[in-house]
Image (tube, coloured by chain):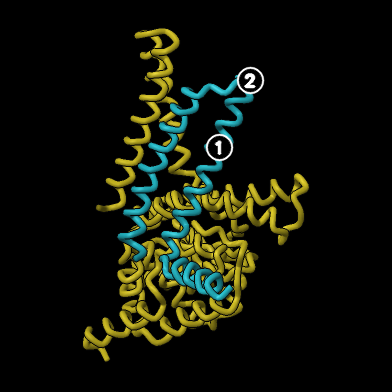
Chain colours: A yellow, B cyan
């Protein structure tokens, strides 16, 4: 299903649920007249909720990762390069946000291609060469081109709020005297909180994000990059970095936004929950598919 | 003693062979059962009396919802993660 009809269906479903609850509450208080007022209140609340869910997620995600907009005055050459890519990909020029986050991330958020924002971190820029960074940006622009950004932003926003509960539980336990971060009690409390919220959040993501999403984006990006070599090197480099370095501060629900899965995949019991958020295909499989499709395209 | 060691190894092997997503569902059920226990404790303290019928109703509704949601999650994970 295309993105727009899915979004309308979600908003209509949400409005129906809210109106039913408020109408039932109104009927309980003042019978038929109360139900009428309940429906009216439900419609107003639905309007506010739909507006918030439409405008807030991308703003929230950029702020959460501390993204600062890169203006043309800050780096004219880089912005001109981005404008050039946007012209090649045939999309409006997206906003570029740079974050100081220590996790090498690049992801796109927004409502549609006119309001898309690409967020990238300094750590990603440190580990990639300029050609590889170009490929990563083209990957994100391909994502904008296939028009998948609002749906994934909305899902990451909702699931991300759910999964934040485990971090809140950890901090709650630390601040109420259960011990230090690595002590057994706070770790167990965090584990139990993760057990409560991570499976529903992961189910939401797996339901909403199709399994072949990355294949179609990779294919478009490789065509624009005019070859898979630098693109594959970029994927392998980021994947290797995540294998070597563990980032516990990553919100697992936001992992699906990144170009490569950034979540730890060790055999620790703590990492069992991260395996639920596996929306990217395995890196080897992904690279094989890119090479195979490129060879089959008859362009080598 | 040897039997104990063998049994322990057997249990560990069985546990290790379970897919990770299934283990997370198991942890999730345990966590939710702890919440149910908390709800029953709070309800009993609030009423200053243990009401068996009320507790059975709360448990029944809670477990019904728990089984439904976890069955749905099981099907989603089985389709996408196995």
Q: Position of residue A106 (x, y in %)?
A: 51, 67
Quadrant of image for the C terminus of chain A: bottom left
Pointer 2 residue? B48
Residue visible at 26% across and 87% down? A295
Q: Position of residue A244 (x, y in %)?
A: 58, 79
Q: Quadrant of residue A98?
A: bottom right
Judged from the image, the secondary structure of the residue bearing numbered disc 2 is loop
- Whether labels 1 and 2 share one chain: yes
The subunit carrying tag 1 is: B
Q: Quadrant of residue B79?
A: bottom left
Mark 1 is surrounded, within 10 Å at the Cα level, by few (under 14), some (14 to 19) or many (20 or more) other residues, namely few
Q: Nearer the viewer, residue A171 or A188?
A: A188
Residue visible at 55% across and 37% down? B37
Q: Nearer the viewer, residue A165 or B57?
A: B57
Mark linked to residue B37: 1
Q: CA distance from mark 1 to mark 2?
A: 16 Å
Q: Position of residue A258 (x, y in %)?
A: 48, 66
**Relative to A177, A57 lies left or right:** left
**Relative to A250, B79 lies left or right:** left
Q: Earlier in the sequence, mark 1 or mark 2?
A: 1
On screen, residue A296 above or below B52: below
Residue visible at 38% across and 43% down? B67
Judged from the image, the secondary structure of the residue bearing numbered disc 1 is helix
């Amino acid at each position: 299903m295309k993105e727009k009809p899915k979004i309308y269906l979600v908003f209509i479903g949400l409005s129906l649920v809210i109106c039913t609850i408020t109408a039932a509450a109104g009927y309980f208080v003042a019978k038929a007249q109360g139900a009428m007022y309940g429906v009216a209140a439900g419609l107003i609340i639905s309007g506010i909720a739909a507006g918030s869910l439409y405008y807030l997620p991308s703003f929230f995600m950029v702020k959460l990762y501390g993204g600062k907009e890169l203006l043309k005055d800050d780096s004219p050459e880089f912005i001109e390069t981005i404008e050039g890519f946007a012209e090649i990909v045939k999309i409006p020029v997206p906003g570029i946000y740079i974050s100081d986050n220590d996790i090498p991330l690049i992801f796109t958020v927004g409502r549609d291609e006119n309001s898309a924002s690409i967020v990238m971190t300094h750590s990603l820029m440190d580990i990639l060469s300029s050609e590889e960074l170009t490929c990563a940006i083209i990957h994100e622009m391909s994502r904008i081109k296939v028009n998948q950004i609002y749906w994934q932003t909305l899902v990451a926003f909702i699931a991300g709020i759910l999964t934040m509960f485990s971090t809140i539980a950890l901090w709650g336990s630390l601040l109420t005297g259960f011990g230090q971060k690595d002590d057994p009690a706070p770790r167990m409390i965090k584990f139990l909180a993760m057990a409560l919220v991570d499976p529903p959040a992961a189910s939401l993501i797996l339901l909403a994000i199709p399994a072949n999403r990355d294949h179609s984006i990779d294919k478009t990006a490789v065509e624009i990059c005019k070859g898979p070599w630098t693109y594959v090197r970029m994927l392998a480099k980021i994947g290797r970095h995540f294998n070597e370095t563990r980032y516990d501060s990553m919100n697992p629900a936001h992992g699906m936004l990144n170009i490569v899965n950034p979540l730890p995949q060790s055999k620790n019991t703590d990492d069992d929950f991260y395996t639920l958020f596996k929306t990217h295909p395995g890196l080897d499989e992904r690279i094989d598919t890119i090479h195979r499709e490129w060879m089959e395209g008859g362009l080598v | 003693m040897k039997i104990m060691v063998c049994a322990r190894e057997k249990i560990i092997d069985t546990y290790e062979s379970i897919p990770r997503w299934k283990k997370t569902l198991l942890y999730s059920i345990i966590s939710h059962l702890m919440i149910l226990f908390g709800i029953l404790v709070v309800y009993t303290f609030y009423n200053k009396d243990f009401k068996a019928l009320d507790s059975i109703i709360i448990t029944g509704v809670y477990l019904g919802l728990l089984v439904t949601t976890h069955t749905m999650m099981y099907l989603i994970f089985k389709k996408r993660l196995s």
